[in-house]
Image (cartoon, helix red, strand yellow):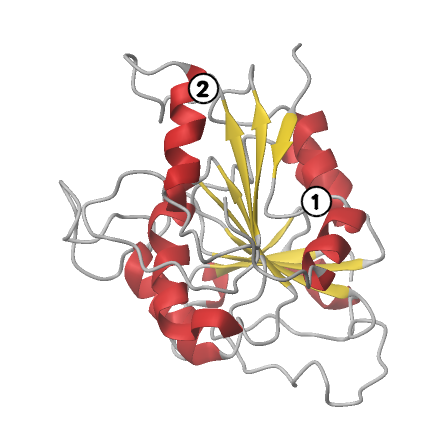
Amino acid sequence: MPTPTLWGGRKQQSYRIVDTFTPTADPADLRFFPHDLQQGNRHGGEKPRGSVQKAKPRNSGATTSRNMRLAVTIIGPGAGIHSNQEAWGALDQNPKLYLQVYGQSRGAYDRYPPSWPGGSPAPNLESLAEELTSSGVVENSHCIVLGSRGGQIVLPHLWSRFGDAMPPAIVINGGCALETPRPIVWPKDVVTLLVMGGQDYFRKPEMSVEQYMNEARERVPKTNGFTAQLVVPDMGHIPEPKVLEAVLSHRVFVALKSWSFSPSQF
């Protein structure tokens, strides 16, 4: 397998899946993965809820074991939670991370918005992003992980709401750097890691792998010096478990969180 290449501007253990934000929702819509509802409150005494509650700010001074871990928010649709359970299960066991997954593949929000061909009215991926905006989830995350359609729709919408205050994002398939129906406003100082495969079906058949990767880079504004692209030539749309485990390691999250170089031109 060809060696992955990196292009850059410069050099709680169980997680839950939330597919609804409505206070009156059926508790069955809140599922713990890979654990069930009965085991869900074994971390920090949390109880399953049908709505997302605003968390305490990261700088609140709290010293619980949860607050000492890096808070990683995963956007479920497109992230391959169920198709890549081995890698996500390994990440689930990392005591340095606290993971929460919002939205489920084929769930209520897993639909393209009307601005996309064949799109649907809310609930859709855009309304999921809006719910995340108002729930306090984003502000209390150290990193956001998205894949496929999550990078195409959810991340750009969050960027439009939070701008440079958006936490770092790991974007599997690089959806935010691909052609979309509407222009994407890419904040100047956001930190982004694009994880892109040369055999991804997002790549048009007439494009070479090099052309595909270069086109994605060209969509990153010249004013943004905090974007890196990890190219895995043989990777398809779904990363192999070892690739995903490496990309989502604790060291990568720490590096993205602390990336503070001055913006550079590409």
Mark 1 neighbour class, 10 Å CA radius: few under 14, some 14 to 19, many 20 or more? few
Residue, disc 2: 210
Residue 99 at x, y percent in the picture: 67, 58
C-beta proximity under 8 Å, tags 2 and 1: no
Residue 19 at x, y percent in the picture: 44, 59
Looking at marks 2 and 1 on the same chain, the residue that comes earlier in the sequence is marked by 1
Q: Is residue 107 left or right of residue 91?
A: left
Image point (30%, 13%), residue name? 205
Tell me where residue 125 sits by quadrant. bottom left
Residue at mark 2 to residue at mark 1: CA–CA distance: 21 Å
Q: Is residue 100 visible?
A: yes
In this rendered view, identify the residue nearer to me: 46 or 216.
Answer: 216
Image point (50%, 44%), residue name? 266
Residue 102 at x, y percent in the picture: 50, 59
Q: Is residue 150 above or below residue 49?
A: above
Tell me where residue 46 sits by quadrant. bottom right
Q: Specify the label residue 11 is tagged with.
A: 1
In this rendered view, identify the residue nearer to me: 40 or 17.
Answer: 17
Dot 2 amino acid type: Glu
In this rendered view, identify the residue nearer to me: 130 or 33.
Answer: 130
Mark 2 neighbour class, 10 Å CA radius: few under 14, some 14 to 19, many 20 or more? few
Image point (39%, 14%), residue name? 208
